[in-house]
Image (spheres, coloured by chain):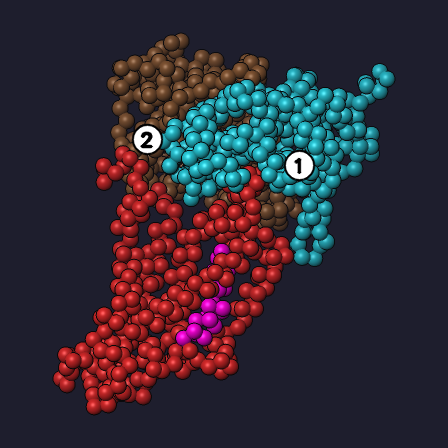
Chain colours: A cyan, B brown, C red
Amino acid sequence: MSYLLETVGLTRRFQVGQGMFKPKATLHALNGVDLRLKKGQVLGIVGESGCGKSTLAKILLGLLAPSEGSVLLDGKDIGTIGRMDFTRRVQPVFQDPFSSLNPRKTIADIVTMPLRVHGIGTDAERRKRAAGIMDMVGLPARFAERYPKELSGGQRQRVAIARALVMNPDLIICDEPTSALDASVQSQILNLLMDLKRELGLTYVFISHNLSVVEHLVDQVAVMYLGRVVELGSTAQVFDAPQHPYTRALLDSALTVAPSLGVPDIGLGTAFPNPLAIPPGCPFQPRCPRAFDLCSRVRPHPVDVALGGAACHLAEEPLRGAA
Amino acid sequence: MLKPLLSVRDLRVDLNTRSGVLHAVRGISFDVAPGETLCIVGESGCGKSMTSLALMDLLPRVARRSADEITFDGQDLTRRRIAGKLRGRRMAMIFQEPMTALNPAFTIGDQMVEAYLYHVGGTRAQAVDRAAQMLEKVGIGSARSRLGQYPHQLSGGLRQRVMIAMALMTDPELLIADEPTTALDVTIQAQILRLLKDLQQELGLAIILITHDLGLVSRIADRIVVMYAGAIVEEGTAAEIFDRPAHPYTRALIDCIPQPGKTERGAPLGTIPGVVPLLIGRQDGCAFRDRCSLAQPRCADDIPTQDAGSHHWVCIHGGQA
Amino acid sequence: MTAITTNPPSRAGRAFRRLAHHPSLLIGSGIVLLMVLIAIFAPLIAPHDPYVQDISRRAVPPVWYEKGTWENILGTDQLGRDYLSRLIYGTRVSLLIGFSVVAISGLIGTTLGLLAGYFGGKVDTFVTFIVTVRLAMPVILVALAVVALFGGSMWVVITVLGLLKWDRFAVVVRSTTQQIRALDYIASARTAGASTAWILLREVLPNIAPQLIVIATIEVASAILMEAALSFLGLGVQPPLPSWGLMISEAKSYMFFSFWLIAIPGTALATLVFAINLAGDGLRDMITPERS
């Protein structure tokens, strides 16, 4: 089986200054991340801030180079693909539609920017293409000559989507695409993303902290904790039968509409994950309500990208017993 | 029903803008009972934040507040001297981004102590004891040493806990929280809200929580006020609002969010066509009628409030329409 | 105005309407524009040749004095040259120096600031270092040394000031670029495959243009004053070229007998600098995002 997107042992370290008199520390933003994504599928990435999901997005977009490991697009290392070919195939939709559009450019300029960068078409052809794309994402043609500040948040996010689509990409990296939007606007953008996926056969990596949205939209989920994938599986596997205590805590803390449930006690304690001092053994062990002696000594096996499952001693035991 | 702790009648907030007077809050009325959680929910621009700022007298300079009545425990909050005595002491506020509400140049201990000495008095040692006690109460371990830390040394979740501890220093009866967990991770959010709920039971605190997050509201609210375009469109208990939403806007808004178990995965979500009306100038009739699927010509006339016990809504349609 | 609001007004139309709200900009730029026109059409406006000396008509006072004549409205200097004509030609020198210096320093400062702000790291450290070095050099003393080496002339003054006065451009452009670099529209351009040059010129530069314009006005005024100071010290523009600074310098020995010889070029200098600063302030107010 071939995959549109594959990451192999993706690792990214940063050197972080800790003040003038202390040596620089190494921050492992990503640590051996393996992911696979088939064409036409949606992979959701969830986790708390600092779990490495934004670093992952930057690497998948080619904005940041991995320290180790590789990203494969259709089986080819993106380092060998060539920047122009790569940018034609992979495009972003960012979180904040107020910072993702250049305030001094018209909407038409913004949408046609990738075409101009790649030297595709004449001015008239580009404008025609922009008009077609704008229509597809539900932007009235009269917006072409307007400036971003004249548009609402939802309209601006449509512009960002139009810009991402103008080159006919295969893969869209959505980094919290609706987090800055109101509920009624969020649903419009999510519907649009689902429609576009069907119509154009797009593949998404969908990064979000909103678990209800992820559950609604994605086919597969990777749960990340301190730079590692701690649980991976289909939406049904992960959301209906979570194996990792962290996944369970995340799902419990998602406040879905349920007036009778009240605010849950998720039992995580107040220890805050520090990416500069990842504990030995299981990284989640200091916060884990189900930790036992093994957890502080032995690091659980990483998730097998082919099988899915959880990187947790509790999840490993029954498997070993069966084998 | 208990005698309300806070009563608001016909509260209006007008903002002067270049294009004219913007009526951000258009005559809203509500009560908060002692020990109750009232959630004010709505989308951006609905006036919910202006309402909270108006209650605390923290409106921006371009804004004007007027009201028939704002009383706290029977005392008239529209009078500056009375409001000044109550604010920060018997009513406190926490904000979305604690980093902007905490002064980065002072330790959290200094800030907590200063506020206490100003409002309550007593000796410095008493105030320090109280601060340490409150930090422990909000779940911050080794409280004494935390008092000497600066805001930037704390994580976002801890900062919000410090904000809550600081707000509770003077043992207030009402806490106004404006999107207190929006900037936090879901796990931290759940913990902070759990903490607020526990503290509320322990201290008999009334809470006004302002948020756009319907899921959050459904979990924490005793009563809910739904705002649209500066006005209250529906008010009721959490069960009434979520199980029997009466106003078409409330219903449409609930349909917009994916609900695990209820919404089919991948199915199109509900949407609300159109945009929020301009809040400049007069608004006759129902402000939602341009976006409403049930709109009729008479929606442009004065809309009567319908009542079903504690459940009210401002719409010509009945609860099950 | 109501007719315009139904259609989105054109860019120029909106700019013009905003201009009407900023009287300081209107007055400042009006005076500057007038001075530019005077400089361009100096040969047509000046009543006399500014270089022709008439020993028989030395130090004639302006027309409003008892001994003044309409022949020389602002009188003549100690060599009998028509003062009005020299003043008019002096506008050319002042504006030429002001704008040329800023063209050079703006180019240097903007380039350094863009590179430092965009690349950060070692590039930033290097640029910050040379900004510090530059700030440690007193402009007047350096100019003195250069003039001592190469002799004084208008082009030496322009070159020296242009090579020295880029620091403000570099500092402001650097910090603004740092802020813009972190915004997602830069990331979007990068993920579209845009080159660094494209990003700097087409995405960043248009967004720092407002700040650049404001600094440029301040720097033009400052360069004009510096030229006057250098010329006054005899290190700048050399006689017989008419420069306002030089006119003041030449008049200083007669200031107790012929006060107007200093007052007239002094007033012209003050008016121009004031107008440029007024325009700069107005521009800054106009481009600062409106608060609603």
Q: Which image quadrant for residue A153?
A: top left
Would you say C35 lies left or right of C289 here?
left
* Label 1 packing within 10 angstroms: few (<14), some (14-19), many (20+): few
Please indicate, yes or no, whether residue A192 appears anywhere in the rendered image: yes
Looking at the picture, how far across and down is residue A230, in whole percent?
A: 72, 28
Q: Residue at x 29, y 66 (%)?
A: C40
Whether the magenta-drawn stretch holds residue C78 is answered as: no
Please indicate, yes or no, whether residue B85 appears anywhere in the rendered image: no
Whether the magenta-drawn stretch holds residue C172 is answered as: yes
Q: Which residue is drawn at 46% across and 64% down?
A: C104
User: Where is C173 relative to C252, above or below?
Assistant: above
Would you say C72 lies left or right of C170 here?
left
* Label 2 packing within 10 angstroms: few (<14), some (14-19), many (20+): some
What is the spatial separation of the Cα atoms under label 1 and label 2, in whole angstroms?
A: 50 Å
Q: Which of C258 and A311 is in front in this view?
A: C258
- The amino acid on which the numbered mark 2 sits, given as a three-letter code, is Leu
Q: Which of A140 and B258 is in front in this view?
A: A140
Q: Which chain carries label 2?
A: B
Identify the secondary structure beneath mark 1.
Answer: helix
- Find the residue positioned furthest to the front: A122
Q: Which residue is drawn at 52% across and 50% down?
A: C200
> Magenta region: which residues?
C154-173
Q: Which image quadrant for residue C71?
A: bottom left
> Mark 1 = which residue?
A81
Looking at the picture, how far across and down is residue A188, in whole percent?
A: 47, 23
Which labelled disc corresponds to residue B274? Answer: none
> Mark 2 = which residue?
B278
Would you say C99 lies left or right of A200 here?
left
Q: Which of C177 and C24 is in front in this view?
A: C177
- Find the residue positioned furthest to the bottom: C56
- The amino acid on which the numbered mark 1 sits, given as a three-letter code, is Ile
Q: Which residue is drawn at 46% across and 26% down?
A: A137
